[in-house]
Amino acid sequence: MSKPFSRIFLPAFLAGFALTVAAAPALAQEEGPVPTTALITVQSKSGAPLNPSMLHLKVDGHDAPITDVAQIPPAAAQIAILIDDGLRFSFSNQLSDFADFINGLPAGTKVLVGYMRNGIVLGNPTFSADHAAVAHQLRMPIAIAGVDASPYFTLSNFVKNWPSNQPGARFVLMITNGIDPYNGSTSIMNQDSPYVQNAQEDAERAGVAVYSIYYGQSFPRRARGSFSGQSYLEQVAEATGGDSFYIGTITPPSLAPYLKDFSKSIAASYMVAFKVSATKEKKDTLTQIKLTTSQPGVKIHAPHNVHPGVYLQ
């Protein structure tokens, strides 16, 4: 049985109460205010823990009360590592770093490895707390031009069919060049992609924080789109409360530092609960939120929108 979230009731600070676990995710089926959660990550310059009483929430531009803040224990984290199957063969040099990352996850953390090809995640990957078994699933990408299609088609399909009906904090880590080949030119003047926007909104509806590591392609026709791909990855990460890791337009020699940063983000994540109005007529509509803190030296990464009634605790 999963360890319950470490609950913080406002205005109490870091009080140790058990969190009642609800079925997740539950889409709102009735009108009126419904319990909703947002997954946030905290960056603290001093390492000080989050002070929930200094969190501020706006829903559709209006101040709204926060009902609960819960730090996420390892057993409540669900991490999907999605690797682009069109990556160059040199990615095989990174496999040991990914194996170390998976094997180094705290006990109870659930993880899966999937390969993105032709708009889907291959096979039927499932979450497991058996980290050694999941690490064993790592392999070289097939590195054939065109098989990667659009990572955003894959992301949309995956988050809409999240392979777990258990409550918990949802994280995706995509390793890809981020290029959307279906949106025409990859020039700086063409950075509005409906497919990227759809993937972003699908992730917000599912309550998923999307992280990404940029990994360039060896195919010349794709190389010129590196800026475009990085821009899209950053767009999705910012909108969902995640982060995007890259160094300019080059492929970094080692991804271990990024995996370390990703681990830190997971460890510094919280679930924030509040109520959002829902209507039967607009059951797929997203609600805009803004979560900030007045705590000195602390920055919050939070989704831009939530789906009313998605309660993942």
Image (tube, rainbow, N blue to C red):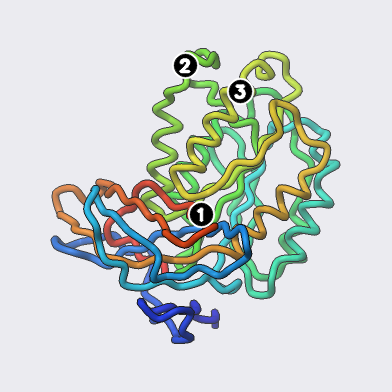
**Alpha carbon separation for disc pair 1 and 2:** 31 Å
The C terminus lies in quadrant: bottom left
Q: Which numbered dot is residue 190?
A: 2
Q: Residue at x 40, y 44 (%)?
A: 202
Front in this rendered view, residue 82 or 185: 185
Judged left or right of residue 41, residue 140 is: right
Find residue 239 and report its image quarter. top left
* Kind of residue sitting beneath label 2: Asn
Q: Residue at x 77, y 64 (%)?
A: 103
The image position of residue 108, as x and y in percent, is 64, 74
Q: Is residue 84 visible?
A: no
Find residue 31 and report its image quarter. bottom left
Q: Residue at x 45, y 59 (%)?
A: 39
Q: Are marks 3 and 2 in contact (CB under 8 Å)?
A: no
- The local secondary structure at tag 1 comes to strand
Q: Residue at x 38, y 46 (%)?
A: 304
Judged left or right of residue 23, residue 31 is: left
Residue at which label 1 appears = 299
Q: Of the residues under marks 3 and 2, which one precedes in the sequence?
A: 2
The image position of residue 1, as x and y in percent, is 54, 83
Front in this rendered view, residue 308 or 295: 295
The image position of residue 12, as x and y in percent, is 40, 81
* Kind of residue sitting beneath label 3: Phe
- The local secondary structure at tag 2 comes to loop
Front in this rendered view, residue 213 or 17: 17
Closer to viewer: mark 1 or mark 2: 1
Q: Which numbered dot is residue 227?
A: 3
Judged left or right of residue 160, residue 59 is: left
Q: Of the residues under marks 1 and 2, which one precedes in the sequence?
A: 2
- The local secondary structure at tag 3 comes to helix
Closer to viewer: mark 3 or mark 1: 1
